[in-house]
Each structure stands twice: as structure tokens, then as C-alpha cells.
Amino acid sequence: EVGGAVPEAQKASWGSFIKSIASFSGDLSSMTAPSFILSPVSLTEYPSYWGEHPDLFAACAQGRDDVERMTNVLRWFIATLKGQYTSRNTSMGSEKKPLNPILGELFIGSWPEQKGEGETTLVAEQVSHHPPITAYHISNEKAGVSLEGHSAQKTSFTGRSITVKQVGHAILRVQRKDAQGGEDLYLITLPQLSIEGILWGAPYIELSGANHIISSTGYAATINYTGKGYFSGKAHSFKASIAPTSKLDAVLYSAEGEWSGVSKWKKAPPGQDSVFWDANNDRREIQVQPLEKQGKMESRKVWEKTAEGIRSGNYDAASKDKSRIENEQRAKRKEETAKGTPHQLEMFVHVPEDQEFVKLISAVSKGATEDTYRRKPRVH
Ligand code: CLR
């Protein structure tokens, strides 16, 4: 039944929303959607999913050798997927449409140290409004691990589902603990996702295709995704393998299972448990300053009234406040153009060609190039 999960009063508007998705491909985030599908959370908050297992993040620097460190990086990566792609279903009943960040919007927070792993900090900034691009930097100085990346999406509608190609990549930097020092890099590419359950009115994400973690140490991990009806017959499944970058089919170790549940080693390193990762382990939510201490560009401050309206079901108030914000933004852009003083990024600088990406990606895709955003050096 089309729209079966949609509240009776919103069936018509859900129908026209689906039609507008179908006839309009590109930037979904700027489309008006029925209220039942709105989330009170802005997309600038999403990079925090990368940090919700601070112990595994810190463990990326541990391991006796490059291969063991790659298995730790792979475990941390797999552990982030449940939060990234299923947490709105868990907390709000279905996938939702996030608030579309304004240019320069910031999200800042941390995961305080709990068990000697060190403090993990996050800054994210909306570096482009149209198309929406979010840059982020997550760091644990004590562990010597940081993650820097940016995230954008290209969406298209395929009849019953929305296909989202993730644009952007992340680089994990790990300080070496041996005598020479220096750092190891891990380029992380991102999987494709599809939003299923659209017609029914209860959207959820499934991952498909593959992504890579390619390290300057000479090893790479390849992760292949499938959903219901493919090799395992189970939703949210993956198979991951670790191999030398120069010979990706010479698999050293592999793991498989559900990224939102339990996964096991298929070909295990010596002395390892059979379980690779159990996603039922707790995720740690990021901590942010109380609202009254936040700056005016900080996400929860910007969207305070809109979010309150969505949370309390006062959608008129929410949409009024959202329009106020959008109008202010238009006026700001106009003024900047008139004065010849374009918006300046606060925390990041745009890098037109990411040389680290170009170098590491060449193992799987010759000649590929991408831009990136780097955290500005901090003046202490
Ligand atoms: C953003 C980057 C994160 C992972 C992630 C998870 C969910 C994705 C989101 C990204 C981008 C925006 C997204 C969202 C799910 C739904 C939403 C694609 C990739 C779109 C814009 C809203 C569609 C509206 C439907 C719910 C009908 O690391």
C-alpha cells in the first residue's frame, strides 16, 4: 500500500512530495517535506557519528604492525556505520529529513576521556550551502589520531528508492609510535546508499556497492555491502577484506556479517576472537556546551526555535522560524555580493586538489582527483 505508514492527514502531501522527488533530481535537502518526516537535527551534526566509539578511534594507533593497525581502523570504521545509517530509525522511528544547514553553521563538541583513551574533540562547519557541504575534523591528541573530511551528496530517484552517491572522502592520520615517528594516512572513501521504504512512507537506509580504506602503509581494506535478498539474505550486510594495496585479491584477513549487528572474522588473524564487531555495544553521544554558552553560528543555537517547533509538533512555528532563517541568509548573501566581501570560512580552508587523496586513491582508481577542506591551524 502506497503511503501506508504516513499519518492520514499527510497522505496527500506525502504523495506530492514523492512526485516532486521524482521530477527533480539533485539537492533533496532544499525541498519542502511533510512535517512527519522532518528531523530537528541539522546535517552539521552528522559528522559526530564518526566519533561515537572513542575507544576504537584511539585504538587505530595501536597494534604491533601495519596489518594489525589496519584491522583496528577497519573495526572502528565498521563500528561507525550503525550510528551513521540506522540511528534516526532507532530514535525517531524512520529515516528523517535533516535541517538544511546555513553557510558557516558550526557544530562543536567532545567525548571526554573515560578509560585512558584521551579526549576526542570535533569541529564541523557548513562550508557550502548550495550544494550542501559539511567539513569536519575529529581529533584525539593523546592517542595521536585525527580524522578530517567533507561530506556532500548527489541524489537521484529510481522509481521506488532514492539513490544517494556520497561525494567527499576522509583522511585518518595516525602518529607512528616507532623510533622514526612520522604519520600513517588512511584514505576513507564512502559507500553509496539508497533510501528504501519511500512509497510506504517509512524511509530507511541500505548501503550498497563498496568503499575502501587505503593506507600509506601499503595495505588496504575493501568493504562490500548488500541488503536483503543478496548473499546473506539479511539487511545491512557487509564483507570486508584486508590485502596489500598492490595486490587487492591477495586477501590476508576478512570479516563479514551485519554492520548494524554482529560480524565475525572469516579469515582471522592469529589469536583473535571469532567476533569482529558487535554493534550492540553502546555508542557514546557527543557532549556539547549548554545552549546559553553557544555562539550564534552554532547549529543548535541557529535552529533552536525551529527544532523546538518540530519536537513539540508545532510545525507552524517551526516553518515560520525556518523561513526567517532562510530570509536572513538571502539578505546576508546579497549584502556580501553588494559589498564585495564574500563569506569567509571560519575553521577550514578549501584545497582545490587533495594530493593525499590523489596519491592514495590511485591504487583503485587511476587519475581520480577530489578537492578537500583542511582545518585551519590554531593560534594558541
Ligand atoms: C550525511 C553524512 C553522514 C551519513 C549520512 C547519513 C544519512 C544521510 C546523510 C549522510 C545525507 C542526507 C540524507 C541522509 C538520509 C536522508 C537525507 C541523504 C549521507 C536526505 C537529504 C533526506 C531525504 C528525505 C527522505 C527521508 C524522504 O556521514
Image: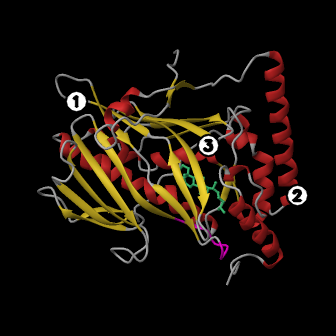
**Label 1 beta carbon less than 8 Å to ligand 1:** no
Please tell me in which quarter of the rendered image ligand 1 is found: bottom right
For the point 80% across and 35% down, which residue is it? 329
User: In the rendered structure, are the residues bearing label 2 and label 3 in contact, judged by CB atoms less than 8 Å apart?
Assistant: no
Note whether 213 is above or below 148 in the view shown: below
Q: Position of residue 78 (x, y in %)?
A: 37, 55
Which circle's residue, 2 or 3, is located before the other in the chain?
3
* Kind of residue at badge 1: Lys
What mark, if any, has residue 44 been given in the picture? 3
Label 2 with label 1: CB-CB less than 8 Å: no
- The nearer-to-camera label among 1 and 3 is 3
Q: Secondary structure at mark 3?
A: helix
Q: Is residue 238 left or right of residue 139?
A: left
Instruction: Quickly name the residue at label 1.
Output: 177
On the picture, is 316 further left or further right than 75? Answer: right
* Residue 41 visible from this viewpoint: no
Q: Looking at the picture, which amino acid does disc 3 mark?
A: Thr
Give the residue at mark 2.
316
Q: Is residue 38 above or below residue 355?
A: below
Q: Residue at x 73, y 37 (%)?
A: 292
| Vertical side of 14 occupied by 30: above or below | above
Q: Residues within 10 Å of mark 1 (few under 14, many from 20)?
A: few
Q: Amino acid at mark 2?
A: Asp
In-front residue for pair 15/103: 15
**Label of residue 352 in the image:** none
Q: Which residues are magenta?
A: 199-205
In the image: residue 223, left or right of residue 249: right
Residue 358 sits inside the magenta stretch: no
**In 3D space, how far apart are the residues under numbered discs 2 and 3 (Cα atoms)?**
24 Å
Secondary element at image label 1? loop
| Drawn side of residue 176 relative to residue 259, left or right | left
The CA span between labels 1 and 3 is 33 Å
